[in-house]
Amino acid sequence: MPVLDFKEIPEAHVANGMQDTFELFARDFLSFIGFKITSAPDRGADGGKDLIAEEIRFGVGGETTVRWLVSCKHTAKSGRSVSPQIESNITDRVAANKCDAFLGFYSTLPSSGLNNILEGLQCEQTVYDRERIEAKLLHSSSGLQIVERYFPVSLSSWKTNNPQPAQLFSDQGSLDCHVCNKNLLEQQDKGVITLWQPMKNGDYSKPDAFESIHWTCRGHCDHVLRNQKQELGLIDGWEDIADVMMPTVFVKWIISILNEQRAGVTYSDEAFDAMKHFLLVVFPYVSRHLSDQEKERIQSLTQIPSYLGGMGY
């Protein structure tokens, strides 16, 4: 699903003082990816070009400068592709502006008819459509600065749904799997955290003491640890770490811990230190807004009666 909504950029044909924004965006984008802008956007007759950008290439024959005629077409509002009727006389325009190549900069896509024309050009050509532009911008801090200027609403939504840990501590710490030592915070699947308690008279209901707390990869590592602990007469309760990293669930955890301690549940020194480490390391990932996916997950979790009871409010 696209991240950037190009409709945030004002239309070029509406004379409200902002009609040059898409061309200015093209200038900043092309500068960002390494082009040198030699003819910037301006108003009035443009001679069939919106910008001229130079690219310096280095090869065995030395340094070569390629002059690109840049044509900006902002059709995101209508959603229409860029057709040959909109992008006409390309060869003549390239020659008239003493350029070597053609670059289409589009907020939608070229039509199949225009693609056929571009493929038949005698000069070099390329197109930056909305997806290619977005892919370049979202993978660097400099690109995100451009996004912040031209797509503030899209960026705000993207940050919410792609949360980064808050920079709260000089050392963010890690959650290393107790079996394979992988840092679970760097994995797509964050694994599980398991709280171990002694089994008393076959009672698996409410704990009165926690012997140890561990976090592991899901699957093999979790099974290895479970077999070790069960041989010691311990039983487990577990939670997805990714769930605990959701702000609402994290609050539920804190409230549950307080309620359990109020009720007399104890932690061994090892378990208590492990819990403190876990909460401190996870909290920077928690101090943020809920993503849209997490909102749906929370809604599904709160439909489970036992989960509702565990909220402790």
Image (cartoon, helix red, strand yellow):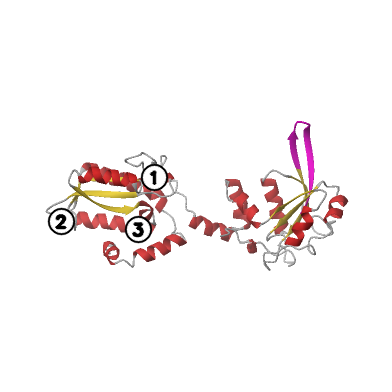
Quadrant where the N terminus is found in the figure: bottom right
Answer with mark 1 or mark 3, whichever residue precedes in sequence.
Answer: 1
- In the rendered image, residue 69 lying in the magenta stretch gets the answer yes
Tell me the amino acid under the disc marked 3: Val
- In the rendered image, residue 295 lying in the magenta stretch gets the answer no
- Tell me if mark 3 has few (under 14), some (14-19) or many (20+) residues whose alpha carbon lies within 10 angstroms of its own: some
Name the residue that disc number 2 marks: 203
Q: Position of residue 128 (x, y in %)?
A: 69, 53
- Residue 76 vs residue 205, the one in the foreground: 205
Q: What is the magenta range?
A: 55-70
Which mark is in front, 1 or 2? 2
Q: Position of residue 305 (x, y in %)?
A: 28, 67
Name the residue that disc number 1 marks: 184
Tell me where residue 42 sits by quadrant: bottom right
Residues at marks 2 and 3, CA–CA distance in whole angstroms:
26 Å
Name the residue that disc number 3 marks: 249
Q: Which mark is residue 206?
A: none
Residue at the image point whose x is 36% and y is 43% from the top? 175
